Image (cartoon, rainbow, N blue to C red):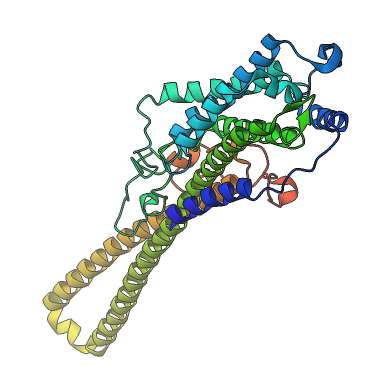
């Protein structure tokens, strides 16, 4: 099912590029003013001092701009290893790169007027640095691995494993590695942001090119620039959507598994409670039997004087029964105390889960004492909520 969702996302992104409305013909000077305003908003606009006399940039400046467009296509291709092979059309991406390489430098002049290659380079360099750092920590990453690899195993037959819930469509960006479910590694936030930056840059360039690439500016038709830019944009958007999908998929899998595991714990507590109730009933029955014995002893009081030896034996028997009952009560009390400790620890664990759910992803911290407490000494991590009321991003101080 989730495979189909990823495929649908990819198709939708491609259709978004394919059905774009035809661009309106505009006066070149008005195009430049409009695009400069939008480029300034995106932080890509060159300084006014860089504008050459007559609006014509040098061949080297235009080649620098070409290099950064190629750099964008390369960045998208490098990120594509993180997602399934059917998400990014690498053949089309290579074709777009070839078109940019072969395009006359003059085709970039109008777009260069509103985009500074140095600023474009800085944004892409940060994104690629994050990807390089991540790839260096996971040298064996491959599209053929999926997020279900190395997930934590079930601790008991009633426990649910996130392995059953995580999507097989997602790559092994960051697997869940803790065998006892005490820690879950998430997709690195900086990696998600780097993919966002790459898409935003592609989106900004495509947006800025809308009024430029379909016009004849200074006698030169720049329409050929639209096609490769749109192809890179489609690939970047599909890549970004898929990484976000996989990140959300991890959250869903962990949430589902946590819910089912809490259900298993609740079932075990119910079973324990049934056992305690049975012991209580048996104890009551023993009490009733002792009462009956006492009545019988009273009824034969007249015979006691004649049968002292027999009474001594009966007394010894009663003492043995009483001692056995006392031993059972001691065992019962220990069982009840253990059950109470387990319940207190479960309540503390549930409070920790609630606090994590109410805390933004980048600030989530597990209180280590939750893992080692025995019950009565477990902390209440929600006790310090402002005003005693917990809500999103308002859960008191973190550990």
The residue shown at (61%, 36%) is 227
**Left or right relative to 271: residue 6:** right
Residue at the farthest front position: 219
The residue shown at (68%, 35%) is 206
* Residue 288 position by quadrant: bottom left
Where is residue 266 drawn, in percent x and y?
Answer: 42, 62
**Quarter in which the C terminus is drawn:** top right
Q: Nearer the viewer, residue 3 or 69?
A: 69
The residue shown at (49%, 21%) is 133
Residue 191 is at least partly visible in this image: yes
Q: Nearer the viewer, residue 315 or 309?
A: 315
**Left or right relative to 350: residue 36:** right
> Height in image: 162 above or below 226?
below
> Height in image: 110 above or below 208?
above
Count numbered badges in the picture. 0
Where is residue 385 drawn, in percent x and y?
Answer: 69, 46
**Left or right relative to 24: residue 6:** left
Q: Nearer the viewer, residue 360 or 9?
A: 9
**Quarter in which the N terminus is drawn:** bottom left
Where is residue 380 drawn, in percent x and y?
Answer: 58, 46
Where is residue 9 drawn, in percent x and y?
Answer: 54, 50
């Amino acid at each position: 099912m989730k495979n189909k969702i990823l495929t649908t996302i990819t198709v939708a992104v491609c259709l978004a590029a394919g059905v774009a409305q035809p661009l309106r013909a505009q006066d070149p000077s008005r195009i430049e003013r409009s695009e400069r305003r939008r480029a300034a908003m995106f932080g890509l606009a060159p300084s006014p001092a860089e504008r050459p006399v007559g609006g014509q940039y040098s061949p080297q400046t235009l080649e620098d701009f070409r290099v950064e467009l190629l750099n964008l296509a390369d960045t998208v291709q490098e990120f594509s290893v993180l997602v399934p092979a059917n998400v990014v059309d690498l053949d089309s991406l290579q074709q777009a790169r070839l078109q940019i390489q072969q395009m006359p430098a003059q085709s970039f002049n109008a777009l260069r007027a509103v985009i500074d290659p140095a600023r474009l380079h800085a944004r892409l360099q940060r994104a690629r640095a994050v990807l390089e750092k991540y790839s260096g920590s996971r040298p064996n990453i491959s599209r053929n691995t999926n997020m279900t690899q190395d997930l934590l195993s079930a601790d008991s037959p009633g426990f649910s494993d996130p392995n059953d819930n995580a999507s097989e469509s997602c790559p092994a960006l960051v697997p869940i590695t803790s065998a006892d479910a005490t820690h879950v590694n998430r997709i690195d936030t900086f990696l998600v942001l780097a993919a966002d930056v790459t898409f935003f840059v592609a989106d900004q360039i495509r947006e800025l090119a809308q009024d430029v690439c379909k016009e004849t500016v200074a006698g030169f038709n720049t329409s050929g620039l639209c096609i490769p830019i749109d192809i890179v944009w489609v690939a970047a958007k599909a890549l970004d959507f898929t990484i976000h999908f996989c990140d959300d998929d991890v959250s869903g899998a962990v949430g589902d598994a946590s819910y089912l595991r809490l259900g298993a714990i609740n079932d075990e507590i119910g079973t324990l409670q049934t056992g305690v109730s049975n012991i209580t009933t048996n104890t009551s029955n023993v009490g009733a039997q002792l009462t009956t014995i006492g009545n019988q002893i009273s009824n034969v009081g007249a015979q006691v004087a004649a049968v002292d030896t027999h009474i001594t034996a009966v007394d010894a028997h009663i003492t043995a029964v009483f001692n056995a009952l006392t031993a059972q009560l001691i065992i019962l009390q220990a069982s009840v105390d253990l059950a109470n400790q387990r319940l207190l620890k479960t309540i503390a664990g549930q409070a920790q889960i609630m606090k994590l759910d109410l805390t933004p992803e980048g600030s989530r911290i597990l209180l280590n004492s939750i893992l080692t407490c025995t019950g009565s000494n477990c902390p209440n991590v929600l006790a310090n909520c402002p005003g005693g009321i917990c809500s999103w991003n308002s859960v008191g101080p973190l550990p």
